[in-house]
Image: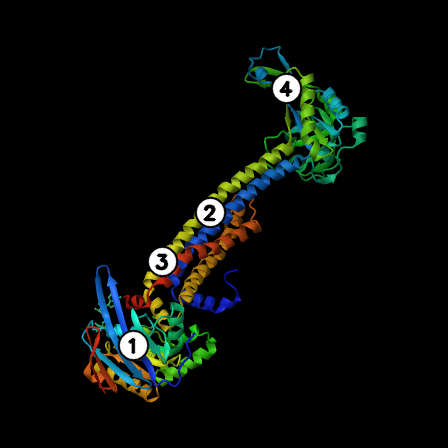
């Protein structure tokens, strides 16, 4: 990576005039329209908005799963908006943790293996990665379930596994796209407690949700509308 | 080598992935297993058959030329009158001319064949009495089981000595002590002086006196006791033939002169024989021909083998492609976590290579088993060459790469976001 990290930057992630345009034949969809926003380190954000307003697009860009059509994206002060696929993968591997609505665990692998997967790609020795996986499983309260497969777990437990996996690489940012969307409200609240603990431990968390009750856990709220920021509240 | 020790981790993880889908993996492998298995088995059968043919020809001696008497076609078809006697074939003089007139001829062995029945007490057997000289046993290699072969003294003294084949000896002598027995052949008693191993081969169409029921006696004795005329009675009519020698085997001093000497012999025989009553066989030429046939055979077998491996490979590609679709979400998850395109390619490639190589190894086991079974059950000779093993294993690994590459590249080319959204 050519750009030096500005470790003294107070911001984890900064969008400068970020646009994302999808062209499908004749039609152009402007999923994000010149969005500028800064996410401070250690902050907990909730992104809300109507369906199709660009929430997931924003999260994907934040997570370096995609590149913006225009604008600059600074991750810890480093411009990552023009990096190639390999560099973006490298950033995801080292600095990003994803939590999805549908958990996205590997169905044939055990809890332990799922949690250790990012460490595999980081080149860890199996013994070390599994001991870290066990540690993380304990942190999310799943020590008893290490050898189970995802299908043998409840939704809440699966999401805990996903959180543990997202934490495996000790990421700078945790990105969660409707993490409670597939869970009942009690389980959803448990997951939110877990995220709050992580925020208190210093992680930057950016979460998409459309439930006000869930969004209330965050310190900052951002409302999207038609690819633009409609409102920010703290 | 694409896969080396650096990729041990990837290989392990690939094997684990494959084990997680046992049914799919084993079905994918099946094409490879039978492809490689049939390739090796086919080549082993082909190799065994041609080796057998080559050995039979080689046993005739690659430095030898075999000249045989042959009844001319016109006399064969002619309605024979009662008094008619057909006179044809090699002459005693031919042998003398061969032995003296050619620079590269090392030795000549005249052969006279007479059909006679052999008898010992109650037992009887139809024999092919071969009147020949001691050198015969040099030119036509046949291990001696007991006693001795014919000697120069037998020749000079025209003794009634006979060398039997093992088969003939068993039929005639049975439990009695074989050597020293006196067998009655065509009215004369012959002392059994030796026994040689039987030739079991089915014959290559060459008239070498190598059948199971041969009885070897001195040429001079055969000539004096049985004469040159044979009488055959077929469907009421009598056929009489006068043949001096049935065969002359010539040994040439070096392989390089075999063909030129054969041409010289041909010219000589054309000069002295008015009728076309002989046939010259050159085992060396047959050997070359057999080798050429074997090459063609191998090419044909190889092509069939190639096609079956191709089918196996396409099977693998098919299932890998299906697996890419089925595992789109998995690919998305791995990419989101930070796997590079290259790592996804490697993962899929290793999976196909492990599949095809494992399939290849099982195929080799089958390929070793089938020829073994064929030899055991049918008694057909088979030869599994190490080349065919190495080749088929190499090819199966290659197929893993070739047919795995496309699905792998396709898997890696997926947009992670799209892949993640895949149901
Ligand atoms: N790959 C794509 N190709 C074309 N258009 C896309 C693509 N991804 C998203 N869009 C469009 O971009 C806009 C924003 O989509 P996005 O997924 O960000 O919405 P969202 O706010 O996450 O909605 P939801 O709450 O339903 O998840 C939508 O109009 C969508 O149709
Ligand atoms: Mg969305």
- Residues tagged 3 and 4 counted as in contact (Cβ below 8 A): no
Are the residues flagged by discs 4 and 1 from a single subunit?
no
Q: Is the residue under label 4 in contact with that under label 2 (CB below 8 Å)?
A: no
Q: Chain of mark 3?
A: B
C-alpha gap between disc 3 and disc 4: 70 Å
- Badge 2 or badge 4: first in the primary sequence: 4
- Nearer to us of marks 3 and 1 is 1
Q: What is the chain letter for disc 1?
A: A
Chain letter of the residue beneath label 4 in the structure image: B
Q: Residues within 10 Å of mark 4 (few under 14, many from 20)?
A: some
Left or right relative to B92: residue A102: left
Q: Tell me the residue that label 3 is attached to.
A: B321
From where the camera sits, is residue B170 visible?
no
Callouts 4 and 1 close, C-beta under 8 Å: no
Q: CA distance from mark 3 to mark 1?
A: 41 Å
Q: Quadrant of residue B419?
A: bottom left
Q: Secondary structure at mark 1?
A: strand
Label 3 environment density (alpha carbons within 10 Å; few <14, some 14–19, many ≥20): some
Residue A81 on image: x %, y %: 34, 72
Residue A16 is labelled as 1
Q: CA distance from mark 1 to mark 2?
A: 59 Å
Can you tell which of label 3 and label 4 is closer to the viewer? 3
State which quarter of the image contains the C terminus of chain A. bottom left
Residue designated by label 2: B306
Q: Which mark is residue A95?
A: none
């Amino acid at each position: 990576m050519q750009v030096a990290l500005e470790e003294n930057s107070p911001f984890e992630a900064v969008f400068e005039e970020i646009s994302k345009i999808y062209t499908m034949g004749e039609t152009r969809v402007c999923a994000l329209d010149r969005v500028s926003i800064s996410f401070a380190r250690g902050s907990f954000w909730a992104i809300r908005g109507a369906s199709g307003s660009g929430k997931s697009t924003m999260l994907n860009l934040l997570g370096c799963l995609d590149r913006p059509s225009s604008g600059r994206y600074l991750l810890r002060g480093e411009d990552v908006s023009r990096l190639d696929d390999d560099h973006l993968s490298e950033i995801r591997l080292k600095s990003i943790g994803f939590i999805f609505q549908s958990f996205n665990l590997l169905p044939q692998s055990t809890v332990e293996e799922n949690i250790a997967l990012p460490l595999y790609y980081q080149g860890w020795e199996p013994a070390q990665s599994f001991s870290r996986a066990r540690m993380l499983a304990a942190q999310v309260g799943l020590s008893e379930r290490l050898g189970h497969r995802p299908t043998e777990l409840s939704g809440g437990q699966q999401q805990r596994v996903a959180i543990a996996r997202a934490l495996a690489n000790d990421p700078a940012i945790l990105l969660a796209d409707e993490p409670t969307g597939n869970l009942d409200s009690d389980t959803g609240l448990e997951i939110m407690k877990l995220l709050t603990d992580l925020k208190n431990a210093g992680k930057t968390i950016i979460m998409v949700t459309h439930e006000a009750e869930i969004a209330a856990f965050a310190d900052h709220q951002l409302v999207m509308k038609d690819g633009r920021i409609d409102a920010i509240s703290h | 080598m694409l896969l080396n020790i650096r990729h041990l981790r990837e290989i392990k993880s690939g094997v684990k992935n494959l084990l997680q889908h046992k049914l799919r993996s084993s079905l994918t492998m099946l094409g490879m297993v039978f492809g490689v298995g049939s390739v090796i088995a086919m080549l082993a059968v082909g190799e065994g058959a041609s080796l057998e043919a080559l050995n039979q020809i080689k046993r005739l001696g690659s430095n030898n030329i075999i000249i045989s008497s042959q009844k001319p076609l016109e006399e064969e078809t002619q309605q024979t009158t009662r008094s008619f006697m057909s006179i044809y074939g090699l002459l005693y003089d031919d042998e003398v001319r061969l032995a003296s007139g050619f620079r590269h001829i090392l030795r000549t062995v005249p052969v006279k064949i007479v059909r006679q029945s052999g008898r010992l007490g109650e037992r009887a057997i139809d024999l092919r009495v071969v009147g020949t000289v001691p050198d015969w046993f040099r030119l036509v290699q046949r291990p001696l089981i007991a006693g001795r072969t014919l000697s120069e003294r037998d020749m000079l003294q025209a003794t009634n000595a006979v060398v039997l084949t093992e088969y003939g000896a068993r039929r005639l002598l049975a439990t009695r002590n074989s050597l020293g027995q006196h067998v009655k052949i065509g009215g004369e008693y012959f002392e059994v002086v030796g026994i040689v191993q039987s030739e079991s081969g089915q014959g290559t169409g060459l008239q070498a006196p190598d059948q199971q029921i041969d009885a070897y006696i001195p040429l001079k004795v055969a000539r004096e006791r049985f004469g040159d005329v044979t009488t055959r009675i077929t469907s009421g009519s009598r056929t009489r033939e006068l043949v001096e020698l049935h065969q002359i085997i010539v040994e040439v001093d070096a392989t390089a002169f075999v063909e030129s000497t054969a041409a010289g012999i041909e010219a000589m025989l054309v000069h002295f024989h008015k009728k076309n009553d002989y046939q010259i066989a050159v085992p060396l030429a047959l050997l070359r021909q057999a080798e050429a046939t074997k090459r063609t055979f191998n090419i044909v077998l190889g092509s069939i083998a190639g096609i079956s491996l191709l089918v196996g490979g396409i099977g693998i590609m098919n299932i890998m492609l299906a697996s890419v679709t089925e595992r789109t979400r998995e690919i998305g998850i791995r990419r989101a976590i930070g796997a590079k395109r290259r790592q996804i390619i490697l993962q899929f490639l290793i999976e196909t290579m492990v599949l095809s190589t494992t399939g290849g190894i099982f195929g080799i086991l089958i390929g070793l088993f089938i020829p073994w079974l064929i030899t055991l059950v049918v008694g057909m000779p088979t030869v599994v060459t190490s080349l065919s093993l190495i080749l088929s294993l190499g090819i199966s690994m290659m197929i893993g790469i070739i047919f795995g590459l496309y699905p792998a590249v396709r898997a890696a080319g997926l947009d992670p976001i799209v892949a993640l959204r895949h149901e």
